[in-house]
Image (cartoon, grey):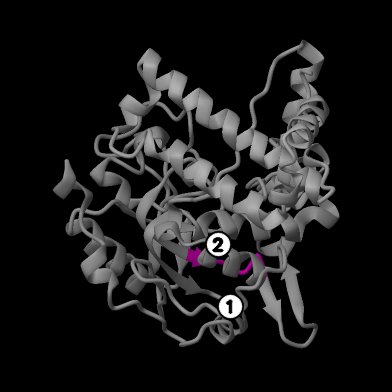
Amino acid sequence: MRDLNGLRDALRRFAAERDWEQFHSPKNLAMALSVEAAELMEHFQWTTEDQSRNLTDEALRKVRDELADVLLYLIRLADQLDVDLIESAHAKIEINESKYPVEVVRPNEIGSTKHILESAAQVGAEVSEFELEVQFRCAGSDGFINWVDNTLAIRRTANVIWEGHEGFEFRIVPSPEELEREIREKAAQGFTARVSAGFCWPWSEPRDDGTLVDDVVIGDYRRPWDAKPGSRNLAPGIPSAALWATDPNGIDQIGCVYNIQGFELDFVGVIWGRDLRYSFDEQRWIGEKAESADSVVKRSRERFVDLVKNTYRVLLSRGMKGCYVYFMDKDTERFVRSRMESGNWTVTEASRVAEPRDRYE
């Protein structure tokens, strides 16, 4: 009886022997399941994060009993509805993989659940799977991530129009200078804030004296990319790639997707280049290889547009409290504005909700 079917059969016998089947309607079972889940939660209600991970033997025994109750009611409910829990769980994992795609921005990047499971099976490793119910980027707004995905046509979601989210600020700005001004202002207030950009300019090696080349040029606006990972003998005041997001001098460089991909910021500024534009005539996204400086992605053929979409998805989702965007292509800007309730949406509550993190340190 060491599988779900064995438990199901035991529960059937248990209920039949006590003539309880008359009470085991899906409604009653669902209500009982929620009560047992609440009793499980009660054991963690006033614990700290550390205490919840280091339960006493007595507390763990009680939690074990509540977990068993939850599982038994779940199995009984699924039996009454003729639901295959294993099959449904695997189907839900596939849905979640589509709903929350791995942020692949280069053709050789991997990391899907399927790939991990297959690799683990090859070496006999045990894998535990957990579903992330809440994400903390974008002020915990799944709506913003869903809207980005829908707008970029990565996947269809219900969030067609960005209507704003209290605590998260999204705004389109008219110039790269304004974008940087906004970001510097947030940094001066104590937030972590950086400017990033699509990979539309060469990423040069440091000069012999360790200074960085002003690769990102838009009219009179000129800034260097952040230092490449592994760059040595950098000039004083220039942080390494690993410290770009936390060193105060990192604000003087533009974050490349291959560096910013590993960071979380309070506020992110995004320069949306011409490598991805929206065509109103064709009613679709167009990938412009000639505007890309990413030699690897440019060789990806038909995958180019999807990889560039993922690049901007990564950049737009780095901020936990806000995101500002400057568009080089105005048709693309107009299209994104058409997917916003207001052409220049700002959540006024953000100024009260978002507070410098050092206030809590």
Q: Say which residue label 1 marks.
A: 329
Q: Nearer the viewer, mark 1 or mark 2?
A: 2
In the picture shown, does residue 144 fall above or below 3? Answer: below
Write the residue at 72% across / 28% down: 116
Q: Say which residue label 2 marks.
A: 145
Q: Position of residue 174 (x, y in %)?
A: 41, 80
Quarter of the figure with the N terminus: top right
Q: CA distance from mark 1 to mark 2?
A: 22 Å
Write the residue at 74% across / 50% down: 22
Q: Quadrant of residue 25?
A: bottom right
Write the residue at 51% across / 42% down: 37
Quarter of the figure with the C terminus: top left
Q: Amino acid at mark 1?
A: Asp
Nearest the eye: 232 or 90: 90
Instruction: Judge left or right: residue 196 versus residue 346.
Output: right
Local crowd size for mark 2, using a 10 Å CA cut-off: few (<14), some (14–19), many (≥20): many
In the picture shown, does residue 334 fall above or below 90? Answer: below
Q: Quadrant of residue 233?
A: top left
Write the residue at 35% across / 16% down: 56
Q: Position of residue 353 (x, y in %)?
A: 25, 65
Q: Secondary structure at mark 1?
A: loop
In the picture shown, does residue 255 fall above or below 198? Answer: above
